[in-house]
Image: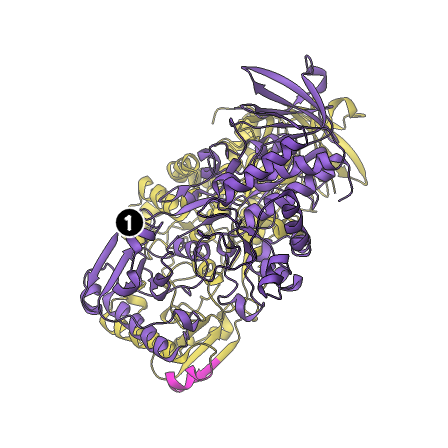
Chain colours: A purple, B yellow
Amino acid sequence: MSFEPICEVDVPQWSGTADVLVVGFGGAGACAAIEAADGGATVLMFEAASASGGSTALSSAEIYLGGGTRIQRAVGYDDSVDDVYGYLMASNGPQADAVKVRAYAEGGAEHLEWLISLGVPFKESELKERAMMALTDDCLLYTGSEKAWPYVDEFKPAPRGHNLEVEGDNGGPLLIKILTEQVAARGLEVHFESRALRLIVDRFGPGARVIGLVVREDMEERYYRATKGVVLCAGGFIMNEAMVAQYCPQFLSGKTFIGNPNDTGSGIQMAQCVGAKAINMHEGFLSVPYYPPASLTHGIFVNGQGQRFINEDAYHGRIGSYLAQQTYPVYLIVGVDDYGNYEQESWLQAPIAGTGESLEELVSELNVPGDQLLATVSRYNEDARRGDDTLFHKRAPWLKPLEGALVALDCTPGAGAFFPCFTLGGLDTTLDGQVLSCSDNVIPGLYAAGRTACGVPRRGDGYASGSSVGDATFSGRRAGRAAAGASI
Amino acid sequence: MSFEPICEVDVPQWSGTADVLVVGFGGAGACAAIEAADGGATVLMFEAASASGGSTALSSAEIYLGGGTRIQRAVGYDDSVDDVYGYLMASNGPQADAVKVRAYAEGGAEHLEWLISLGVPFKESELKERAMMALTDDCLLYTGSEKAWPYVDEFKPAPRGHNLEVEGDNGGPLLIKILTEQVAARGLEVHFESRALRLIVDRFGPGARVIGLVVREDMEERYYRATKGVVLCAGGFIMNEAMVAQYCPQFLSGKTFIGNPNDTGSGIQMAQCVGAKAINMHEGFLSVPYYPPASLTHGIFVNGQGQRFINEDAYHGRIGSYLAQQTYPVYLIVGVDDYGNYEQESWLQAPIAGTGESLEELVSELNVPGDQLLATVSRYNEDARRGDDTLFHKRAPWLKPLEGALVALDCTPGAGAFFPCFTLGGLDTTLDGQVLSCSDNVIPGLYAAGRTACGVPRRGDGYASGSSVGDATFSGRRAGRAAAGASI
């Protein structure tokens, strides 16, 4: 499939025109369309699927925002912009985009207000459990590693995952339902089952302006004109195996790609074919979703050397990224009491590698140097008794000696456990979503947001749940307003 | 600086024409030019510096080749193509290019013959020491991790670094001297102090053909036409801090960029501006050059948890890549006897972090959990006495208990030790050096080789010395012949 652009002179006829054309009706596209319309632009949306949703609808929509949102204040958290900024800069590593992170930290409270103004419901409450998502209608949840080493020593923690007020894991569907209603309320034209194929440029060569889209719908190719801009919100590329093999092949073995089927990188590729630069293409989220039950956090992960490698109270995506780099096998060892309702509650589905009435009995069933594992557990138990994890700094509430009957789960990628992953690379854009070329020039008329762009979340080992939906809705808004020519 | 192409219609006048234009006169460019000329093409070379050399001239030129080269056979190694292929595929990880690796493994013996036919001297001998490069005129040297775990268990090892027959670290200069003479012997026109600025295309848009180069020389911009092809051999991008910050920011702190000053990524960027795809841009070589003296291999590396993290008999680049991912500080602990002539012989320049007449005394001077470090050393010593490193599988000859007076070197990046690095990302090319677009189509008329392309070496943790010069000369030859329209 070729994503090469076509030139205006080769357009046989225009099937429609709007100020702003939006590709993709997920969280980013919806917010781009709403803001473009509110900025005074006429808007036309194209969505390859039969309905709105994208990957946002499949997510929990734990929107990661901080710096003193209405809910944070109501619940009693004094979160600061500087702590959000510092945490996100540190956790997104050397490739963090300081400009985008700063705007995101400063704009968090306002962004939540905007969502509330659209009718997105948030309860003034916190879910205090260690959980992957809220299954209650509570709002605030720690969804990153804010309370874990090394971040907790540097930045004051606060829960920043904002779950919608809805029971069950229904945040994504509810968010999309509301955003879809807002699009409808504005009377915006939406074409479903309509696949963007190529960009249209006013001419070929340096300085070319993107002026439209070739779209396949109703079994024909049609040409739509954008008088102000095209906004690509077409998702990431985790569903494109060739792109994954080329850019992030570490995800090919033993991992499960998550996202919607149209996360094929088409937005990235269309833009690349007009000279756009893609960055951070090797990075992605990789989770070992080992809680719930939260009690498993009392356990320890050990690698093929029988050594621990991380503080187990970190976010599941941080642990997953570290885990993938270890010598295999990797086991999670936990007491039978803490194993609890694992089989009912867990997403992990890791097979049992061994069990034992004692540590020695368990060790004999595992495929790691037994004496090292005994030493590792012995040391961990001493630290746990003292309440001080001197090696990895797991916090005291999660420290508990591994004694009595024990279970080891096989968390080796490929051994049966569930390792969901998705991509964190995309188009290089300005803060306002303008797509940058390989020469670092703005490509006139072209914008991108959500996972088609490379935004705030940039590292698997620093990821926080809600930073994709947060970034998608935030960046979608900015791109929509900029494309409409409205002030930001 | 913009690398956007210009169109044929905008060329005011042509200053020269050749079948093949070669950008860069390092190892790749020289071999491309020689093969293009031998394939019947007229050739014109452009080099930004005042003389030939590139990064090849700065290297040791330990050309990594195997599969039964003349020297391997003479010395008594029965190396097979399958072992070379298997080792390179495994060590270059999931992003290894099977087609390029297969051709490189199969073509190793012939490539050495070709170099010999040009007059490059190799002695039928082996340097048996563990060394970074041969300072004698001996040829064969183990320059990767072939004899180290995990590779040694899977692929029959053989030394594949082919050092030129020259005393001292003079392989690179001698190789370039000979290649330069070969270029001169063919009467090829070479423009020095001549910087390629942009590509010239026959038209803009999909399917455009590269037909020439804009070059700055003698203080003016000139236009050169290629009737068959342009070959970009302009090096990597380690000297371009903005590109490093964007693509491989892990190299920004505490590391030293190595290469020639023109490794600015200009070849990659010129090609990207005509639609080329760059891949593997996050990867690079990162060394902790901790031997010589080889005796330091008897020591152990420990991380901020006081744990070992690798078999210390692996290649220095493999250890460097692992080291950079650890919790800091990282120390190398070694006995005073093995410390030997470290201060005279070592490239590492790591400061001493502590010394002690006993392990306990040393530990008290270090900034890691002391009891864990004691346990780590105790266990290592037991393994060493038994001759079996049960955790990391360092081979028996390098196992020796750490007893008596000990030294710890501070190998934390940024603490003063020398961590040289360079990039391993570049243009996606076919086996014959044709540059691929973001749509995976060949860009007509455009070729790339050496570090401007993404070739055989793709991972820092699997790198072997000599694989850059080996790949540069090998890929340069193929690109040169293909550009000339000669059979491969």
Placement of B165 over or under B48, stated as above or below: below
- Residue A20 forms part of the magenta stretch: no
* Residue shown at the point (47%, 46%) measured from the top left: B458
User: How many residues crowd mark 1 within 10 Å: few (<14), some (14–19), many (20+)?
Assistant: few
**Front-most of residues A302 and B330:** A302
Q: Is residue B352 left or right of residue A44?
A: left
Please identify the quadrant where the C terminus of chain A is shown: top right
Q: Is residue B380 left or right of residue B57?
A: left
* Residue shown at the point (53%, 45%) measured from the top left: A424
The residue where tag 1 is placed is: B154
Q: Residue furthest top?
A: A12
* Residue shown at the point (45%, 83%) measured from the top left: B355
Picture quadrant where residue A295 is located:
bottom left
Residue A64, image x, y percentages: 57, 53
Residue A357, image x, y percentages: 18, 67
**Front-most of residues B223 and B391:** B391
Res B21 visible: no
* Residue bounds of the magenta highlight: B354-365
Picture quadrant where residue A353 is located:
bottom left
Placement of B174 over or under B35, stated as above or below: below
Residue B276, image x, y percentages: 60, 33
Residue B205, image x, y percentages: 67, 24
Q: In what element is the residue under mark 1?
A: loop
* Residue shown at the point (50%, 50%) measured from the top left: B61
The kind of residue on which mark 1 rests is Glu
**Front-most of residues B430 and B16:** B430
- Residue B358 forms part of the magenta stretch: yes
